[in-house]
Image: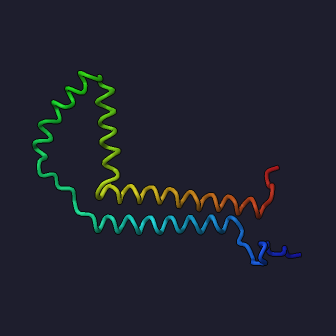
């Protein structure tokens, strides 16, 4: 016996949910990686003209920050600067590539799990 295809209210044939989730995962993966490649190719390098001045003033800034807020304030400031840098320039391309790869592979993995459970029923019970 074959199962009849699932249809919606208008009589159209519906795709199984795991196929839809898999398609979304592939779309996220492809579009995210293409976007990351475009961003990487089109965004100019961040050239800091006054890098020497920043390095000289950084020690004084960190010292003052440590005096006012302790070592935790210095670590929190370093984390904040690192996290903010992820969303600018070529780092944005890397961030987008990693996030889209993780989201796309997660969707594909979830779709595989959904297909196994829909095909096998309750195999473990």
- Residue drawn at x 75%, y 77% as measured from the top left: 13
Q: Which scheme is used to colour this image of the protein?
A: rainbow
Vertically, is 68 above or below 96?
above
Classify residue 119 by image quadrant.
Answer: bottom right
Q: Is residue 111 left or right of residue 33?
A: right
Q: Is residue 79 left or right of residue 25?
A: left
Q: Position of residue 99 (x, y in %)?
A: 45, 55
The tally of labels here is: 0
- Residue drawn at x 14%, y 41% as measured from the top left: 54
- Residue drawn at x 43%, y 56% as measured from the top left: 98
Q: Locate the N terminus and report the quarter of the image it occupies.
A: bottom right
> Closest to the observer: 109 or 19?
19
Q: Position of residue 33 (x, y in %)?
A: 42, 66
> Closest to the observer: 71 or 8?
8
Q: Position of residue 76 (x, y in %)?
A: 34, 33
Spot the residue most to the front: 10
């Amino acid at each position: 016996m074959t199962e009849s295809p699932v249809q919606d209210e208008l009589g159209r044939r519906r795709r199984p949910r795991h196929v839809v989730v898999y398609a979304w995962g592939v779309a996220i993966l492809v579009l995210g990686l293409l976007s990351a490649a475009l961003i990487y190719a089109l965004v100019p390098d961040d050239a800091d003209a006054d890098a020497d001045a920043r390095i000289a003033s950084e020690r004084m800034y960190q010292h003052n920050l440590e005096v006012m807020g302790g070592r935790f304030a210095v670590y929190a400031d370093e984390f904040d600067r690192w996290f903010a840098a992820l969303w600018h320039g070529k780092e944005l391309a890397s961030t987008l590539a990693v996030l889209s790869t993780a989201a796309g592979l997660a969707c594909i993995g979830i779709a595989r799990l959904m297909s196994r459970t829909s095909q096998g029923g309750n195999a473990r019970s």
